[in-house]
Amino acid sequence: MSTSPRRIWLRSTSRLAVQPLAGLRALVAVAALLLTLIPWPAAASGGWEIVSQQAEATFSSSLELSLRVRAPEPIVEVILFYGRTGDRIVRRIYPSFRPASELSLSHRELLERGQYAPGTELHAWWQLTDRSGTRFETPEQIIQYDDGAQDWEMLAGDGVRLYHYGVRASQAQGWVEAAEASLEHIASTFGVAPTSDLHIYVYRSERDMRSALATRSDDYDERVTTLGVAVDEDTLILLEAQPDLEATMAHELTHLVVGMATDNPYAGLPRWLDEGLAMVAEGELPRQNELALRRGISDDDLLSVRSMTSYSGRADQVDLYYGECYSVVRFMIETYGREDLSALLDAFSVGALQDDALEGVYGFDVEELDALWRESLGLKRRESALAAPELAAR
């Protein structure tokens, strides 16, 4: 699985080619995907024989892999590898077995909700060693990890692939066109563009989408409805039943594009910047966020910019958090221009920490940014740089 931080946007509740996927789904049980079954002939390399090799995935539930193999001598070591295709890091599993020349092996890996995005391609293979020290690897199995509970259709556009079900083709086409327009706006506003196609899954209801979402906490999940979330480096899921799906789409596409542009093995983008860019890409600040921001300004009860480097984790701060992120990034664009913001993203793309990146582009650190932003709102600077460290900066 990727080690990149997952980008999540949650809001409080208080040209085109159509490719139907129904034929594929008809081959798949609603809850489980039987993905790979490889029968092998008796002849095999060096006397090794794969009798059967199978992989079966149940979306957001489990991954089951099995192998029946024969070897010239007793097999003394077995390792199962699996992970996302393209990732350098994979899981190593050591199944229990008794050494023998013929083995029937199996492993069931429990998966959490949201552990892998819909459409993720997984791969798995077995490595076995016999008593003579001879090592044998099975062919790699490719596992397409799909949410088989829905009868998906795919609509392809310029840089995006949109998966949908239960809606008119014209409505889905409108979403694709909105996604293309958002990508053009992101490129012109922030100077970044996707490096590969982006995948958008539109769920019709919260119940349908629940299996694809990671659980945060019972309280948080109960009080907050997820309208859209980037669940992978190139994949986002959206809830159709919302007032403005296109604004949510613009938000999440910004996360994906900015994530691609700033990806590096050293440091991630500060959350206040990541979320602020996405909020600005939407257009107008949503009313609930605007009201929360106004209350925070009126009561002088704003989160510090440094504290917003990570999420607060408190459901009662969601609206304020996103309102502040929008306000800070809007302030930076209006005061210092788009070119400096683009230069800031370039600094983060090579792994700069937030204070170093800010100093290099703007000549001030995150505390000074907080002070300047507060002054633009008519508020005094904080009495101390540590006055509101709700969360430690990374």
Image (cartoon, rainbow, N blue to C red):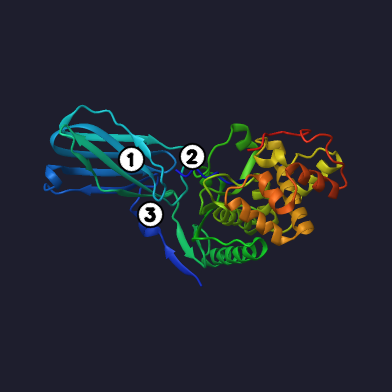
Residue type at tag 3: Arg
Tell me, yes or no, if residue 12 can be seen here.
no
Point out residue 305 in the picture as x, y percentages from the top left corner: 73, 42
Point out residue 52 in the picture as x, y percentages from the top left corner: 21, 43
Residue corresponding to mark 2: 113
- Quarter of the rendering occupied by the N terminus: top left
* Rendered image: mark on residue 25: 3
Instruction: Report whether 332 appears left or right of 352.
Output: right
Does label 1 or label 2 sit earlier along the sequence? 1
The quarter of the picture where residue 226 lies is top right
Q: Residues within 10 Å of mark 3 (few under 14, many from 20)?
A: some
Task: Assign a secondary structure to mark 2.
Answer: loop
Distance in Å between CA atoms under marks 1 and 2: 21 Å
Decide: is 363 above or below 73. Answer: below
Task: Assign a secondary structure to mark 1.
Answer: strand
Q: Residues within 10 Å of mark 2 (few under 14, many from 20)?
A: some
Instruction: Report whether 208 appears left or right of 258.
Output: left
Distance in Å between CA atoms under marks 2 and 3: 20 Å
Residue occupying image coordinates x 60% and y 37%? 221
Does label 1 or label 3 sit earlier along the sequence? 3
> Do the residues bearing badges 1 and 3 touch, measured as CB atoms within 8 Å?
no
